[in-house]
Image (cartoon, rainbow, N blue to C red):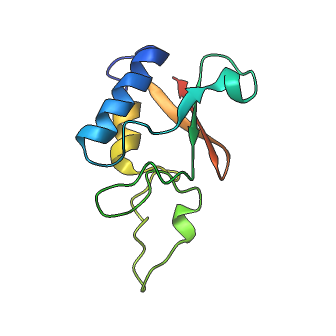
């Protein structure tokens, strides 16, 4: 459910502050405009495999193959939503945005 649909600049600022405030990443998390990636307009380009986005348990915020990872018969990624940490997924969705994978290392954010 979308609470509000914020602008791209607001989304980038809010997401940076969120990952820092929740201790799940750093303020230098890789985020650029999609225009810088391939010319697509109005989206946000994120690194899907960068080490700058790790939660307090050492799990990455983004993991394309989340459902296929198993560690000691327990799947630490079982709560991921389409390869995105659930806290980050819900935060973004509440602001009117959604994640879309381009490839296993490249993630985009788009307005709903």
Spot the residue most to the left.
21
Spot the residue most to the front.
28
Q: Is residue 96 above or below residue 80?
A: above
- Residue at (66%, 53%) from the top-left corner? 104
Q: Is residue 105 left or right of residue 86?
A: right
Q: Is residue 1 visible?
A: no
User: What is the quadrant of residue 78 in the picture?
Assistant: bottom left
- Residue at (69%, 24%) from the top-left corner? 36
Q: Position of residue 64 (x, y in %)?
A: 58, 56
**Numbered label tally:** 0
Q: Position of residue 43 (x, y in %)?
A: 59, 23
| Image quadrant in which the N terminus is located | top left
Q: Is residue 97 visible?
A: yes
Q: Position of residue 79 (x, y in %)?
A: 39, 59
- Residue at (43%, 51%) from the top-left corner? 61
Q: Is residue 91 above or below residue 78?
A: above
User: What is the quadrant of residue 22 in the picture?
Assistant: top left
Q: Position of residue 67 (x, y in %)?
A: 53, 65
Q: Is residue 24 above or below residue 76?
A: above
- Residue at (52%, 51%) from the top-left corner? 82
Spot the residue most to the bottom.
72
Spot the residue most to the right.
38
Q: Is residue 4 left or right of residue 36?
A: left
Q: Is residue 11 above or below residue 74?
A: above
């Amino acid at each position: 459910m979308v609470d509000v649909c914020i602008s791209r600049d607001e989304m980038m600022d809010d997401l940076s502050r969120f990952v820092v405030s929740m201790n799940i990443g750093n303020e230098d998390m890789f985020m650029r405009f999609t225009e810088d990636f391939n010319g697509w307009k109005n989206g946000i380009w994120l690194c899907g495999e960068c080490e700058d986005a790790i939660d307090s348990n050492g799990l990455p915020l983004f993991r394309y193959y989340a459902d296929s990872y198993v560690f000691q018969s327990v799947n630490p990624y079982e709560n991921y939503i389409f390869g995105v940490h659930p806290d980050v997924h819900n935060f973004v969705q509440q602001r009117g945005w959604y994640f879309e994978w381009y490839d296993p290392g490249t993630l985009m954010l788009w307005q709903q």
